[in-house]
Amino acid sequence: MRLSARNIIKGKIVTIKEGVVNSEVVIDAGGSTITSIITKDAVASLGLKVSGQAYAVIKASNVMIAVD
């Protein structure tokens, strides 16, 4: 598969918190964590498991930065 997204980060799944419809998946990407909310069906379809490997694919046209 080829993607147009240029930010593809491989990491290890450290937690999967299941909700009623969605799940929160947290990936450790070399000391930084990336969190994504995806459907429970997507977790099952992708076969995601804690300690498994996965990619965080980030495609954003805008990234906002803020300070206090």
Image (cartoon, rainbow, N blue to C red):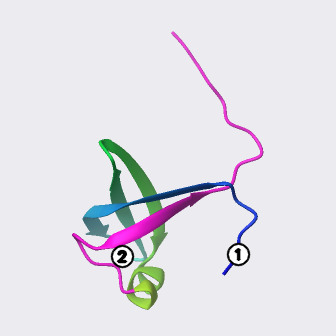
User: Quadrant of residue 2 in the image?
Assistant: bottom right
Q: Is residue 28 above or below residue 1?
A: above
Q: Amino acid at mark 1?
A: Arg
- Range shown magenta: 47-68
Q: Amino acid at mark 2?
A: Val
- Residue 64 on the magenta segment: yes
Residue at label 1?
2
Residue at label 2?
20
Instruction: Look at 29% across and 42% down and name the residue there.
Output: 31
- The answer to whether residue 55 is left or right of residue 11 is right
Q: CA distance from mark 1 to mark 2?
A: 32 Å
Dot 1: what SS? loop
Is the magenta region chiefly helix, strand or loop?
A: loop
Question: Total number of numbered labels?
Answer: 2
- Residue 65 on the magenta segment: yes
- The answer to whether residue 15 is left or right of residue 4 is left
Pinpoint residue 5: horizontal percent, then vertical percent: 70, 59
